[in-house]
């Protein structure tokens, strides 16, 4: 059963990237969980008929399923627990407790035993859900899929069966590389978007399934629909921002994220819980920082980052460190403020709680990268090389043993990320020496290493690698190649003023003045809300003024 518990914990974190510091399961504060759950307003309706003698228990099961689909695991767990109190013989209440990727593992083991024992007392339809869950533990992934497919075949009107199967298949899924010999979850959900346009889970999972791929705009319809389906659930209100961010509609994304922040803040104050029991709070603020950066809202992003700094580090919540504490440094990197990035990271490295674990080592690796890039800004190649050696030594140390201890969920990804940064820094060192061919080889190494990284929300790479390539080509006077690189960067960050500024430089230096003017004008329009004292904005205006003379 341990493997099954781990899988459901991972499934809950699959697209939201929020595992625990010491285990992949997140443990909620027991005293709060045990309080009677409220009936919440505006969190979606998901009828899920179960065998129970208590209409009130049925109501809480329905709410728990809606909250489960909305990734509001804290309240989902409370709802299923309340249902189990109202009717201890309700097998699906215990099943819901087990399905929710939160809570003490001892409680999950107990729930597993409970719903398995009660299975003979429930309907044939419910027994399929229970058998699928039990078989996942004993026989593995394919057995679960087969049992759920049989459920769908025998009960074609059970929409939840299709949605739960799609949810299961979402783990590790990439829309550009669907798994062979398994159903494509997109194909399961697409018909539901039309036949059941008000289904919260269908839209939510469809967004998460589509967003890692090359066509996030395919989820635009779901992004438009979802927030109205559960306006009281902060994560669901937040979700349209994922797609708006990816298609370059940054102001619309901001609206979603700010609205979600208001809901989270009110909820946390009313219920009396902290951010370590509301993962969406940190996740949403991290998106606000990243999104503001693409709009040129540097000061605004700093303010959101400061709110993240106020969240206390937790041994149970790595998201607070990796998405929260790191947000300010990523912001500085996005704007090329390498000295500020190094200073911010230095403050993190001085934290005694980080010195003996992976987070501290990872932070020192980022410092080496930021200081190396800052040295190159000062044309100090020798110092940059020293920092590159430091970064290389850190990466080499990770070759021996488990780098993260119990922090492995994030550690595996961040080790590879540091490898990418080491190659990127080396590429810029070669560029500074006018060794263009060697620079391209190192950059290509960075690109190949980055391909092995999973999709992150928001992106771990504050600055797209293709913008880095554009700078390398500009340094070598390769104007066409630089333009191509910036165009590639703009595919991953559409309408970003950063990429458009680089594109304008490439056109201008290559003597294509009209195209340069158009690129700068696009950058100016993209940064309609940018800080007036932003150096990049001043450069854009200066270049456009020069063309007018």
Image (spheres, helix red, strand yellow):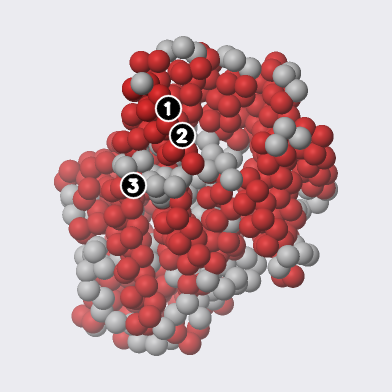
Q: At 36% from the left edge and 21% from the top edge, which residue is drawn?
A: 549
State the CA–CA distance, disc 3 to disc 1.
Answer: 19 Å
Between marks 2 and 3 in the image, the one whose residue lies nearer the viewer: 2
Dot 2 or dot 3: first in sequence order is 3
Is 104 placed left or right of 524 in the picture?
right
Q: How many marks?
A: 3
Labels 2 and 1 touching (C-beta < 8 A)? yes
Residue 36 x/y as whole percent:
35, 87
Is the C-beta separation of discs 3 and 1 under 8 Å?
A: no
- Closer to the camera in the image, 355 or 232: 355
Secondary structure at numbered mark 2: helix
Q: Which residue is mark 3?
A: 529
Q: Is residue 329 left or right of residue 499?
A: right
- Decide: few, some or many residues near mark 1? Use Cα within 10 Å; few <14, some 14-19, many ≥20: some
Distance Cα–Cα, label 2 vs label 3: 16 Å
Q: Quadrant of residue 83?
A: bottom left
In the image, is residue 543 above or below residue 288?
above
Residue 96 seen from this side? no
Mark yes or no: residue 257 visible. yes
Q: What is the quadrant of residue 417 in the picture? A: top right
Say which residue label 2 marks.
539
Provide residue 14's location: percent of width, then percent of height. 48, 52
Relative height, residue 267 to residue 160 (above, below): below
Residue drawn at x 51%, y 17% is 509
Residue holding disc 1: 543
């Amino acid at each position: 059963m341990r493997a099954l518990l781990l899988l459901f914990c991972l499934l809950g974190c699959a697209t939201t990237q929020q595992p625990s510091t010491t285990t992949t399961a997140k443990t909620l504060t027991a005293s709060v969980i045990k309080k009677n759950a409220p009936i919440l307003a505006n969190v979606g309706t998901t009828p899920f008929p179960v065998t129970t003698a208590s209409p009130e228990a049925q109501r809480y099961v329905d709410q728990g399923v809606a909250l489960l689909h909305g990734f509001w695991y804290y309240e989902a767990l409370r709802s299923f627990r309340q249902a189990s109190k109202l009717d201890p013989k309700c097998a699906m209440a215990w099943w819901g407790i087990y399905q929710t990727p939160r809570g003490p593992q001892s409680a999950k083991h107990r729930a597993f035993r409970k719903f398995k024992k009660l299975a003979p007392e429930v309907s044939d339809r419910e027994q399929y859900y229970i058998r699928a869950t039990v078989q996942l533990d004993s026989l593995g992934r394919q057995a679960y899929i087969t049992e759920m497919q049989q459920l769908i075949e025998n009960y074609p009107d059970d929409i939840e069966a299709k949605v739960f199967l799609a949810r299961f298949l979402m783990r590790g899924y990439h829309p550009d590389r669907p798994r062979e010999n398994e159903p494509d979850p997109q194909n399961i959900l697409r018909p539901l978007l039309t036949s059941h346009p008000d289904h919260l889970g269908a839209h939510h999972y469809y967004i998460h399934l589509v967003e890692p791929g090359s066509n996030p705009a395919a989820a635009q319809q779901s992004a438009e629909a979802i927030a109205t389906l559960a306006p009281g659930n902060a994560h669901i209100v937040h979700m349209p921002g994922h797609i708006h961010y990816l298609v370059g509609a940054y102001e619309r994304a901001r609206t979603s994220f700010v609205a979600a922040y208001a809901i989270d803040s009110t909820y946390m104050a009313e219920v009396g819980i902290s951010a370590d029991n509301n993962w969406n709070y940190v996740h949403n603020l991290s998106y606000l920082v990243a999104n503001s950066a693409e709009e040129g809202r540097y000061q605004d992003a700093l303010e959101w980052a400061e709110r993240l700094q106020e969240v206390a580090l937790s041994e149970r919540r790595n998201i607070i460190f990796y998405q929260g504490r790191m947000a300010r440094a990523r912001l500085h990197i996005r704007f090329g403020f390498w000295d500020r990035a190094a200073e911010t990271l230095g403050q993190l490295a001085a934290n005694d709680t980080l010195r003996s674990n992976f987070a501290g080592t990872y932070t020192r690796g980022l410092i080496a990268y930021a200081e190396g890039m800052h040295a190159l800004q000062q044309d100090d190649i020798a110092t940059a090389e020293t920092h590159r050696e430091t970064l290389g030594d850190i990466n080499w140390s990770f070759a021996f043993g488990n780098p993260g201890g119990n922090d492995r969920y994030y550690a595996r990804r961040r080790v590879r990320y540091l490898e990418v940064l080491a190659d990127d820094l080396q590429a810029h060192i070669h560029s500074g020496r006018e060794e263009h061919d060697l620079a391209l080889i190192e950059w290509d190494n960075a690109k190949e290493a980055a391909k092995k990284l999973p999709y992150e929300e928001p992106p771990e790479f504050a600055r797209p690698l293709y913008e880095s390539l554009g700078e390398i080509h500009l340094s070598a006077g390769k104007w066409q190649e630089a333009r191509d690189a910036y165009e590639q960067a703009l595919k991953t960050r559409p309408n970003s003023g950063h990429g458009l500024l680089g594109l304008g430089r490439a056109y201008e230096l290559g003597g294509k003045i009209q195209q340069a003017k158009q690129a700068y004008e696009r950058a100016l329009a993209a940064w309609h809300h940018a800080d007036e004292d932003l150096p990049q904005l001043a450069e854009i205006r200066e270049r456009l003024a020069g063309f007018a003379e």
